Image: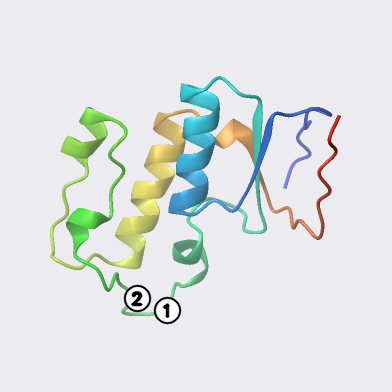
């Protein structure tokens, strides 16, 4: 991993780059305008879909659930070939979302958070 500068003061910190973490960074930064940084131990986005790469890995929920609804074009593009989608398809989708909405620069991949302290000042 290349070193990336992290602002010393941020408005919000997000731990994880799965569906929830990606949405949180998008919402906090792109919609609310907050200085946001996300951290993930993995070298890229995907959460559980980054780590679980075994043969036959697929969603256990119908595919229409596996897409973000915050952008109309994204909803139209997020059509799946099968009722239950495979790990590679989900990971590709998450990679596309992170890049399409310029979220990658707000994440620090390959970074494990061992503790955090909230300062009330």
Q: How many marks?
A: 2
Query: Which residue of the protein is positioned furthest toward the top in this rendering?
Result: 33
The quarter of the image holding the C terminus is top right
Q: Quadrant of residue 23?
A: top left
Is residue 87 found left or right of 30 in the rendered image? Answer: left
Location of residue 92 in the rendering, given as x and y in whole percent from the top left corner: 36, 51
Q: Secondary structure at mark 2?
A: loop
Tag 1 residue: 54
Q: Residues within 10 Å of mark 1 (few under 14, many from 20)?
A: few
Is residue 116 found left or right of 88 in the rendered image? Answer: right
Q: Quadrant of residue 43?
A: bottom right
The residue at 40%/48% (across/down) is 94
The colour scheme of the drawn protein is: rainbow
Tag 2 residue: 57
Q: Along the line of sight, which residue is nearer the eye, 27 or 121?
A: 121
Q: Secondary structure at mark 1?
A: loop
The circle on residue 114 is: none
Q: Quadrant of residue 10?
A: top right
The residue at 52%/68% (across/down) is 51
The residue at 13%/58% (across/down) is 81
Gap in angstroms between the C-alphas marked 1 and 2: 6 Å
- Asked whether the beta carbons under mark 1 and mark 2 sit within 8 Å of each other, the answer is yes
Location of residue 91 in the rendering, given as x and y in whole percent from the top left corner: 39, 56
Is residue 51 found left or right of 74 in the rendered image? Answer: right
Decide: is 45 above or below 51.
above
Decide: is 100 above or below 57.
above
Location of residue 86 in the rendering, given as x and y in whole percent from the top left corner: 28, 67
Decide: is 103 above or below 118.
above
Location of residue 99 in the rendering, given as x and y in whole percent from the top left corner: 45, 34
Q: Residues within 10 Å of mark 2 (few under 14, many from 20)?
A: few
Query: Which residue of the protein is positioned furthest toward the front in this rendering?
Result: 120
Is residue 27 found left or right of 12 in the rendered image? Answer: left
């Amino acid at each position: 991993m290349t070193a990336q500068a992290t602002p010393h003061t941020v408005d919000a910190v997000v731990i994880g780059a799965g569906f929830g973490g990606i949405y949180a960074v998008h919402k906090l930064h792109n919609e609310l305008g907050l200085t946001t940084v996300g951290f993930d131990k993995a070298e890229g986005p995907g959460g559980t879909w980054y780590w679980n790469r075994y043969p036959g890995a697929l969603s256990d929920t119908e595919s229409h659930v596996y897409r973000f609804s915050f952008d109309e074009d994204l909803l139209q593009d997020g059509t799946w070939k099968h009722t239950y989608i495979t790990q590679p398809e989900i990971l590709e989708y998450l990679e596309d979302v992170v890049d399409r909405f310029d979220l990658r620069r707000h994440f620090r991949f390959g970074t494990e958070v061992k503790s955090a302290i909230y300062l009330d000042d």
